[in-house]
Image (spheres, rainbow, N blue to C red):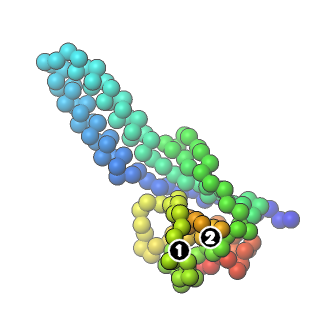
């Protein structure tokens, strides 16, 4: 049995919601720091909002790591470049189709009512290089794999993986 090992790291970026909350907490910190001149407990509120803003901003950075090993795809979520959590594991044998997001190979699957999991880069590129994987008829997984990752999958399941 040949073991192929490929890993791909994708920066999902910082979410707009987290950026907005962090900026709001920064503004509140400045406000409480200025209010500290007139109100004594404002120092405590300034410290609390500063710490909360730092925590929100630090945790806003998210990356996904795709790992292919021995007919198995593993997706890990890395928060703030320090904490890793396994999000999902997929068996290549159970994949129905793996193709670019705008591929005609996905036409038969487009009207399905499935659960969607997006583990791709948030910034959309032109041309769109994301891939869609339909898994066991009940899940649609969106990924942003490298060319080497797609090639490794294509070697294992050539009738299910398409490059268009």
Work out whether mark 2 precedes mark 1 in sequence or the reverse, and give the earlier one: 1
Residue 9 image point, x, y percent: 57, 56
Circle number at residue 112: 1
- Mark 1: give few (<14), some (14-19) or many (20+) Cα within 10 Å: few
42 on left or right of 100 = left
Vertical side of 132 occupied by 102: above or below? below
Q: Which residue is found at the position 53% from the left and 74% from the top?
A: 112
Residue at x 56% of width, y 40% of height: 83
Q: Is residue 91 above or below residue 78?
A: below
Q: Residue furthest left?
A: 38
Residue 150 appearing in the image: no
143 sits left or right of 40 in the view: right
Circle 2: is it few (<14), some (14-19), or many (20+) Cα within 10 Å? some
Vertical placement of 135 versus 81: above or below?
Answer: below
Rendering coords of residue 3 (x, y %) = 80, 62
Q: Which residue is mark 2?
A: 137
Instruction: Measuring from the top left, give residue 26's x and y in whole percent.
Output: 27, 36
Q: Image quadrant for the N terminus?
A: bottom right
Q: Position of residue 131 (x, y in %)?
A: 55, 70
Image quadrant where one finds the C terminus = bottom right
Residue 82: image quadrant is top right
Do residues under tags 2 and 1 come within 8 Å of each other at their CB atoms? yes
């Amino acid at each position: 049995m040949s073991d192929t090992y490929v890993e791909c790291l994708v920066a999902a970026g910082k979410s707009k919601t987290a950026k907005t909350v962090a900026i709001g907490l920064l503004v509140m910190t400045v406000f409480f720091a200025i209010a500290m001149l007139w109100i004594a407990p404002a120092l405590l509120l300034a410290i609390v909002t500063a710490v909360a803003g730092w925590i929100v901003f630090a945790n806003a950075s998210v990356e996904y790591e795709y790992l292919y090993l021995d007919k198995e795809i593993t997706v890990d979520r890395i928060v703030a470049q320090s904490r890793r959590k396994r999000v999902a594991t997929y068996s290549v044998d159970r994949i129905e189709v793996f193709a670019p997001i705008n591929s005609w190979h996905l036409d038969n699957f487009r009207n399905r009512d499935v659960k969607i999991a997006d583990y791709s880069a948030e910034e959309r590129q032109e041309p769109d290089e994301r891939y869609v994987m339909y898994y066991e008829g009940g899940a649609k997984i969106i990924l942003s794999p490298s060319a080497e990752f797609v090639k490794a999958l294509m070697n294992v399941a050539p009738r299910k993986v398409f490059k268009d």
